[in-house]
Amino acid sequence: FDNRMVNHFIQEFKRKHKKDISDNKRAVRRLRTAC
């Protein structure tokens, strides 16, 4: 469940900011702890 949430937010961020944060390990980790 958590991974799907994280992936959803990555896609959402990509759509809004035109940046891909999935390769940014710190950002992904922060998303995981936020969920």
Image (cartoon, helix red, strand yellow):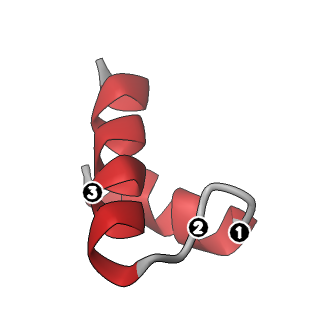
Three-letter amino acid code at disc 1? Answer: Asn
The residue located at (28%, 35%) in the rendering is 5
Three-letter amino acid code at disc 3? Answer: Glu
Residue occupying the far bottom of the picture = 17
Tell which of 14 and 29 is nearer to you. Answer: 14
Q: What is the crowding at mark 1: few (fewer than 14 residues within 10 Å), some, or many (at least 20)?
A: few
Nearest to N terminus: mark 1 or mark 3: 3
Three-letter amino acid code at disc 2? Answer: Ile
The residue located at (30%, 40%) in the rendering is 8
The residue located at (53%, 76%) in the rendering is 19
Task: Where is residue 32? Give x, y as percent.
Answer: 42, 50
Q: What is the crowding at mark 2: few (fewer than 14 residues within 10 Å), some, or many (at least 20)?
A: some
Of helix, strand and loop, which one carries label 2? loop
Of helix, strand and loop, which one carries label 3? helix
The residue located at (62%, 55%) in the rendering is 22
**Residue matched to label 1:** 24
Relative side of 14 to 27, left or right: left
Nearest to N terminus: mark 2 or mark 3: 3
Task: Where is residue 18? Give x, y as percent.
Answer: 45, 76
7 up-or-down from 32: above or below: above
20 up-or-down from 10: above or below: below
Between marks 1 and 3, how big is the CA–CA gap? 15 Å
Between marks 1 and 2, how big is the CA–CA gap? 5 Å
Tell which of 7 and 26 is nearer to you. Answer: 7
Task: Where is residue 16? Give x, y as percent.
Answer: 26, 74
Relative side of 27 to 35, left or right: right
**Residue matched to label 2:** 21
Using the image, tell me which numbered label, if any, was put on residue 12.
3
Between marks 2 and 3, how big is the CA–CA gap? 10 Å
